[in-house]
Image: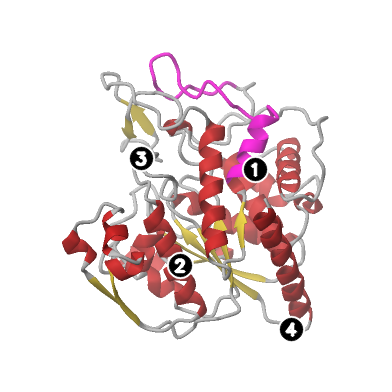
Amino acid sequence: MRNRTRHILRAAVTIAALACSQLASSAPIRILFVGNSYTFGRVDPVMRYNAANVHDLTAAFYRINPAGTNPWEPHPWGGVPGIFKKFTSEMGLDYDVALSTRNAASLRAHFLNSANADWDLRGNVASQVWDIVVLQEQSDGALPGGRGKNANPLQSRATINAFEQFIHDGAARSFSETALYGSEAACKATGESARQCRRTHAIPANPNANPKARIYLTQTWARPDMVFAHRPAQPDRSSVDGRPKADPAGAMTTPYYPSLAAMTQDLRDALEADLAANPRLLRVLPVGDAFQRALDQNLVRNTGFYDANGAAAKRQADDLMDLWWDDRLHASKYGSYLAALVQFGAITGIDPLALGPHEKAAAELGIADRDALLLARIASQQLGFRPANTGMEPASAVPGQ
């Protein structure tokens, strides 16, 4: 807790200094969001929200080679960065917002450009001088070993640190996998063979490195599909958005976690440990904790994610807001909106409640004013702007996403 408080105080001082510098300059604050479908939103209305006012740096790659993107995810994307941009515009702030994202990408995939030969994701990070970079790891990548399909905390931390050096210092590097992890034993602990550990990667220099860049880590949310047993599902390719279609004959899954709260804690602990291990990282953006706060206060749907047959349960018009989309993995429009509120408040230092009771992005996303205000209160509480308000009432969802 002491380390977390120290990082928050350091972040507050840094934010205040940046705000003062912007007042003295007409240049916009350049911010890059690096991530995957959690960042770009996965489905409309979030996926293409406000895309005209942000820079989708992977859109050009998609036009050359669409491999790495599902057919129901056409570019350009706006996503959570698009909502963030709308918030900054409403508050009179000048942020130049960009996103570099790819479906299912880990930070390692970004750093080593493992998507395909035409997707230079690391090049996006080196494409200009950034004032702020927000790094979002694969949803289960930072979890303890065995606690997720892609859980690999050593690999996650090593890649975060490699990105930090690339963004801040930018020197060309040539290193083996063993050097990345510190020893061959540590490399093998990630699941790689001795031969793989001796592979060498050549990373060119970043000509736009910025030692003053603020680097944030996004704490993602717990996943109902990793907590509640269900039948395996695959995207329905005949649908407009690839929504999940359960296999009625499939065996029920074995959950990785006993509760959403337990998974949230592991995600929090992993990123806080990454932060403590590298003082050049500024802060963890507690999106997952905000999800859990809403659950703990019984303000959003916290049970009944699957029906008796193990398929995603259908929503009813009088249900509570559901922070998850139908696959119980990605955020719904409500979850993405909450994610944007938390990131906006933490990065700008402005209480999300300052956006007011009739916030424009919410209206454009089809989120009722009452629901948007409730989510803003959750974000405000999570960031320490306002004390918990036990008088808040659960909000009903608009049918749909």
Which residue in the protein does label 4 denote? Answer: 25
Spatial CA distance of label 1 from label 2 is: 25 Å
Neighbor class of circle 3 (other Cα within 10 Å; few <14, some 14-19, many 20+) is: few
Q: Amino acid at mark 4?
A: Ser
Mark 3–mark 4 Cα distance, whole angstroms, equals 49 Å
Going from N to C along the chain, the mark reached first, 3 or 4, is 4
Q: Name the residue carrying label 1.
A: 290
Q: Pinpoint residue 4: horizontal percent, then vertical percent.
A: 66, 55
Q: CA distance from mark 2 to mark 3?
A: 22 Å
Q: Nearer the viewer, mark 4 or mark 1?
A: 1
Q: Is residue 300 magenta?
A: yes
Assign a secondary structure to mark 4: loop
- N-term-proximal mark, 4 vs 1: 4
Q: Amino acid at mark 2?
A: Asn
Q: The disc labelled 1 sits on which kind of residue?
A: Ala
- Which-is-in-front pick, marks 1 and 3? 3
Q: Which residue is mark 2?
A: 161
Q: Main secondary structure of the magenta part?
A: loop
In space, the residues marked 1 and 3 are separated at their CA atoms by 25 Å
Considering the numbered disc 1 on the image, is that residue within a helix, a strand or a loop?
helix
